[in-house]
Amino acid sequence: MLYALVERWLVETNAFHLPIGEMTITLDDESKLLHLPIFCQFYTHQTLDAVETNDLLVESIRVDREVASEETRHFLGAHVHLSYLRDVYEDACSRRQWIVAAKAYLLHPVGCTIFTDKSATSVNVIYLGFFVDLRLAGGYDWVTIVLTHIYEQL
């Protein structure tokens, strides 16, 4: 069914071309079909340059700046390997830094499932912004965030 919808997606109009006409999925549709409330705060982000990416990695998951630079240099952008996140998580657990471990752990499944991309081996560091303050992570409007990401990927 997903492939059938993708084949009917029109980038020019951001809508599906169906036999009954053009239509799009709205947040109201998502809310009613999935029974998910849409009332939380939005998360907005901007594209990160290399310095901002490394700063976010150093401040959030406490990695060495040189190691962060080396990791992001592979992608020429704000991405890190999923295997790198697993290593950060294991290292943080061994040092008993549970907040750092939680942030690295949460970024991994978010990059693998919700915000996956064609590479299937990396995650955009911008999503680490969701977990800078773990108390706020549950307050984001995840339905809207995911729907927006799906639209961007289509």
Image (cartoon, grey):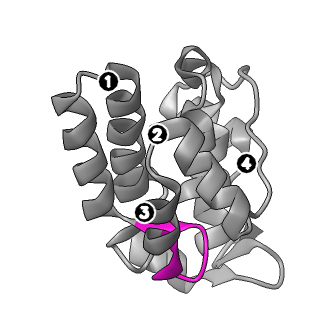
In front: label 4 or label 1: 1
Q: Quadrant of residue 129?
A: top right
Dot 1 amino acid type:
Gln
**Residue at disc 3, secondary structure:** helix
Residue furthest to the top in view is 135
In front: label 4 or label 3: 3
**Residue at disc 4, secondary structure:** loop
Image location (x, y in percent) of residue 94: 16, 31
**Residue at disc 2, secondary structure:** loop
Image location (x, y in percent) of residue 21: 74, 74
Label placed on residue 26: 4
Residue 146 seen in the current view: no
Reply above or below: 123 against 33. below
Q: Is residue 95 left or right of residue 54?
A: left
Image location (x, y in percent) of residue 128: 55, 44
Residue at mark 3 to residue at mark 2: CA–CA distance? 11 Å
The residue that mark 3 highlights is 67
Quadrant, the N terminus: bottom left
Label placed on residue 97: 1
- Local crowd at mark 1 within 10 Å, few (<14), some, or many (≥20)? some
Pick whichever of labels 2 and 1 is earlier in the sequence: 2
- Local crowd at mark 2 within 10 Å, few (<14), some, or many (≥20)? some
Dot 2 amino acid type:
Arg
In front: label 3 or label 1: 3
Dot 4 amino acid type:
Thr
Reply above or below: 17 against 44. below
The residue that mark 2 highlights is 62
Residue 140 seen in the current view: yes
Quadrant, the C terminus: bottom right
Q: Residue at x 66, y 65 (%)?
A: 151
